[in-house]
Image (cartoon, grey):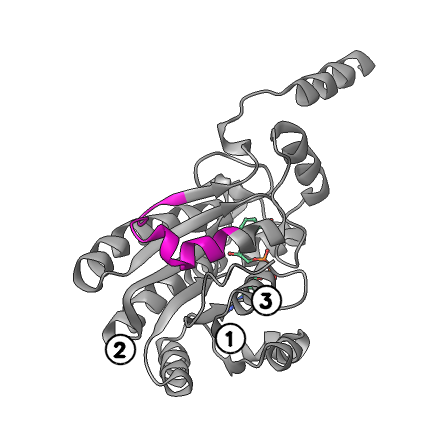
Amino acid sequence: MSYNLLKGKKGIIFGALNEQSIAWKVAERAVEEGAEIVLTNTAVAIRLGDLNALGEKLGATVVPADATSPEDLENVFKTAMDVFGGPVDFVLHSIGMSPNVRKGKPYDGLDYKMLQTTLDISAISFHKLLQKAKELDAIAQGGSVVALSYVAAQRTFLGYGDMADAKSLLESIARSFGYYYGREKGVRINTVSQSPTMTTAGSGVSGMTDLLDFAEDISPLGNADADDCADYCISLFSDLTRKVTMQNLFNDGGFSSMGMSLEAMDAFVKGRQKH
Ligand SMILES: NC(=O)c1ccc[n+]([C@@H]2O[C@H](COP(=O)([O-])OP(=O)(O)OC[C@H]3O[C@@H](n4cnc5c(N)ncnc54)[C@H](O)[C@@H]3O)[C@@H](O)[C@H]2O)c1
């Protein structure tokens, strides 16, 4: 159902790879709510994924860009401003990748070159994106920027490796940049901390299926899926959240506030009785 929450607004969506991607769902919902968008991902992701098909379906221009490259980011913002004839109103950063996690390196056996790549792609790219947007004045007064995070930024999760450090940095960048961009240009910056979700990035985390089941059992409302995340992002891009900034906002069915649930306790007791 559409509420026309983004009627007349223009946005850029980073990170839609395929139909499972959270950014894919956000792109679809944004257009459904009346927005015009530009889509971007790396050249490789565009070649291997389905972004061009999404662009055709939504009438959106697709711009290749490596989010770690300030030159590529400049091209994305300049292209979007050309397409829209002015600055954008919202941006989604839905980007994450860890070579350490991909290669199964444990947290106490990290490859430091890979750690640099993890941090650059998954967190510092957010700073680069914001710095470039501010330099080009590419986001309109009152605009909204959202990046996607995970609760491993606050608490330790087996298998999430150096992505936990990347998410902590990502959330810190949202807070710090939120001050400068808010004060000078009225732009708000938040992170949405999403439930585990079965996507290409999500399935790279070891034990993802069990983690999904565990989170589902613990959360009173159950896991938030990619569609739930898209709805929440739309509310943050809309004018209904004008004074929300510098926050890490949980979209996780209550998981982050739980200690122990009946379902999880039952599973624990059954497991103990077996031994
Ligand atoms: N899936 C989950 O369980 C989960 C939970 C919480 C947060 N998140 C976060 O949501 C975001 C989106 O992930 P997803 O789960 O939709 O998976 P996804 O694999 O569909 O999306 C990750 C995207 O990052 C892009 N990317 C990687 N390197 C890039 C680079 N150098 N420049 C530009 N783009 C690059 C990929 O091409 C891909 O489109 C990520 O930040 C992820 O950490 C995911």
**Left or right of residue 270: residue 217:** left
Image coords of residue 193 (percent x, y): 48, 45
Q: Outermost residue, left direction?
A: 184
User: Residue drawn at (45%, 53%), measured in percent from left and top?
Assistant: 235
Residue 257 seen in render: yes
Callout 3, which amino acid? Answer: Glu
Badge number at residue 40: 1
| Dot placed on the residue nearer the N-terminal end, 1 or 3 | 3
Quick one: which residue is furthest to the top in this view? 273
Tell me the crowding category of disc 1: few under 14, some 14 to 19, or many 20 or more residues within 10 angstroms, Cα based.
many
Total marks placed: 3
Q: Which residue is mark 2?
A: 136
Cα separation, mark 2 vs mark 1, equals 18 Å
Say whether residue 122 is left or right of residue 269. left
The quadrant in which residue 7 appears is bottom left
Magenta stretch in the rendered image: 232-248
Note whether ligand 1 is within 8 Å of mark 1: yes
Amino acid bearing label 1? Thr
Residue identifier under label 3:
28
Q: Is residue 112 visible?
A: no
Closer mark to the observer between disc 3 and disc 2: 3
Q: Is residue 255 magenta?
A: no
Foreground: 143 or 16? 143
- Crowding at dot 2, Cα within 10 Å, few <14 / some 14-19 / many 20+, comes out as some
Look at the image and tell me in which quarter the N terminus lies: bottom right
Residue at the image point whose x is 56% and y is 63% from the top: 29
Viewer-nearest residue: 26 or 196:
26
Instruction: Tell me the CA gap for discs 1 and 3.
Output: 14 Å
Look at 41% across and 79% down and name the residue there.
Answer: 76
